[in-house]
Image: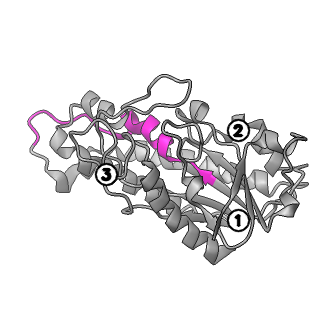
Amino acid sequence: MRRADIHSPEALSDMTLPVFPHQYAHSFLAAGDSWFSLSQVPSSSLLFGLRFARSALIINCATPGATISNMIDWRRNRQFESLLGPGAPFRWSGILVSSGGNDLINAVDHLLLPFPSGAGLDAEHVERLIDSDGLQRFEIYLRQNYTDLISLRDAPGSPNQGVPVFAHTYDYATPRDARAKFLGLPAFGPWLASAMRRKNIPPSLWIALSRALQDKNAEILLRLALPQLQVIDTRGILTPAPLDTSGEAGDWGNEIHPSGSGYRKLAARWNQRLGEIL
């Protein structure tokens, strides 16, 4: 099994780089968040762990700077749009998308209810702290974005009509004071831990509540049922980080990003699913 050649979109027009999708057995267009981007410190990406029986190319449009605040960022990524939709120069073997996780984190203040004063909630009842109306709005938002993505792929004049889109759920991040760092950018976060504090949620409930939120997010993605959208369930693969840690711990490099070894574990699940479809 071989690793894919991974390039930015600029490589397609760089005459010094012989990057021609038609020369590969498989060619993929990737977009999304920092789980796909290549600029994390230490540099790591889920894409690094993908393996193929034959030659493969990945043109990666993911960038951490823009997508750290919004994973579904393809609307503002003109390179991705021009390589997928009407007039695109290639028909890809598949579209790889990492999105939905940071959107959940951005929405967490609207998804969590303030902890009721004097409440005696335990970990088995943390779903009472999730706002059902906020969750419904979040599902509408995610569905609309993915529907628009599929519509772009299948638009008249697109050579990529019906090409499979591979997306994924997220594993269970522990709310903790472990900030994320990217090349040339200040440290980000923490996100989950900060939201828990703003809602006055006791630390003893943070892990259970974070898991419940990730499960809700995964359930939304798995029931999208859009044409040729393959959602890969990657929950329960990584070793969680302990609550009181601030650096790399378990299979996590920081609060919401896996370590290099963690990405490799997730990529193994991707490899299985990609092999089944391709």
Category of crowding for the residue at label 3, using alpha-carbon neighbours closer than 10 angstroms: few (below 14), some (14–19), many (at least 20): some
- Quadrant where the C terminus sits is bottom right
Q: Quadrant of residue 157?
A: bottom right
Give the label on residue 75, or none: 2
Residue drawn where x is 60% and y is 31% of the image: 66
Residue holding disc 1: 164
- Quadrant where the N terminus sits is bottom right
Give the label on residue 250, or none: 3
Foreground residue among 87 and 256 = 256
Element class at badge 1: loop
Q: Between marks 3 and 2, how big is the CA–CA gap?
A: 34 Å
Category of crowding for the residue at label 1, using alpha-carbon neighbours closer than 10 angstroms: few (below 14), some (14–19), many (at least 20): many
Q: Between marks 3 and 1, how big is the CA–CA gap?
A: 32 Å
Q: Position of residue 188 (x, y in %)?
A: 44, 28
Q: Amino acid at mark 3?
A: Gly
Q: Is residue 3 magenta?
A: no
Q: Position of residue 229 (x, y in %)?
A: 64, 63
Q: Position of residue 17 (x, y in %)?
A: 84, 45
Q: Quadrant of residue 254?
A: top left
Q: Amino acid at mark 2?
A: Arg
Q: Between marks 2 and 1, how big is the CA–CA gap?
A: 19 Å
Q: For the residues carrying marks 2 and 1, which lies nearer the camera in this image?
A: 1
Residue drawn where x is 57% and y is 35% of the image: 64
Q: Amino acid at mark 1?
A: Pro
Q: How is the image coloured?
A: one colour
